[in-house]
Amino acid sequence: MSRVIALLLFLAVSLPSHAEGFITRLLNKPVPGGVAVIELGNGTAAPQVRYQDKPALVIREDGQRWIAILGIPLTVKPGQQQVDIDGSPRSFQVQPREYRAQHITLKNQRQVNPNPADLKRIERELAEQTAAYRQFSPNQPSNLLFDRPVEGPLSSPFGLRRFFNGEERNPHSGLDFAAKAGTPIKAPAAGRVILTGDYFFNGKTVFLDHGQGLISMFCHLSAIDVKVGDQLGRGDILGKVGATGRATGPHLHWNVSLNDARVDPSIFIGAFKH
């Protein structure tokens, strides 16, 4: 009898970890700038989920239960957050995470304090890019464990509090890869090109829609090798590493956005460190 009780206790402890699927284990990092995975049950139809009044990515994990994958903005404070599932609220917890500071010196003072003409251009470009981040296509992403877009060491991590010439600006919204100018940049997952441009801060830039509000942005490119409307497969070349825009040297800056929240790309390549 004692052996039976021991077995039942073992199963009670072990079942939750076995029930948790690969995608949940990979992506569930519920911190500011992270990702929360919410279980939705085993219904026949996908539940409709909204977070901060924006539609969320919903997939069926392991061919069984539905899950919602939510991007948590960096501005969210640790504590309780609420998500809407088929019109009903549900709470989840956001854990704390500390981000360090980065001090950068720029020779071009206009890239720290733009002049009035620059500000008009920046405003126009920001509206264009914001609209791209907010696109929500119905197709599901081809994969959620992404490939690295370039080979090379990670340099500036996501979430850094950035100071340009001693003045604080927006936190680092992506992940930087140290790579030589001209290095080919690959699509980390299949997607459709929804925006390209040459922007004041970002330089030559490509936006790739992976599906259901999951968007990648690649910037500071030396060359763009795709056009809007192109459908890329995983591993297809979209451009080359450069140092255009506000950059101190050649590197790739890669953003990942979920439900219009910029989140830590390291989560999607299995490199997240709390």
Image: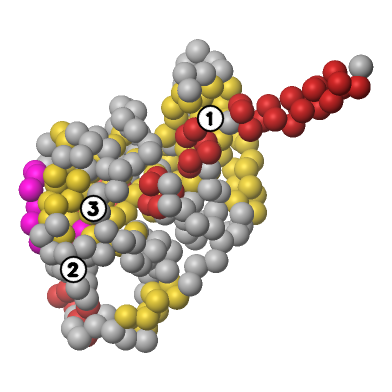
Question: Hey, which quadrant is residue 113 in on the image?
Answer: bottom left
Where does residue 118 sit, x and y in percent of width and height? 17, 74
Q: Residues within 10 Å of mark 1 (few under 14, many from 20)?
A: some
**C-alpha distance separating marks 3 and 1:** 28 Å
Which disc, if any, is residue 127? none
Which disc, if any, is residue 250? 2
**C-alpha distance separating marks 1 and 2:** 38 Å
Residue at x 56% of width, y 27% of height: 40
- Circle 3 sits on which residue? 150
Where does residue 99 sit, x and y in percent of width and height? 50, 67
**Is 223 part of what is drawn in magenta?**
yes
Q: Nearer the viewer, residue 176 or 129?
A: 176
Sequence-wise first label, 3 or 1: 1
- Circle 1 sits on which residue? 21
Q: Residues within 10 Å of mark 3 (few under 14, many from 20)?
A: many
Amino acid on which disc 1 is placed: Gly
**C-alpha distance separating marks 3 and 2:** 13 Å
Residue range corresponding to the magenta coloring: 219-227
- Work out whether 69 lies above or below 43: below
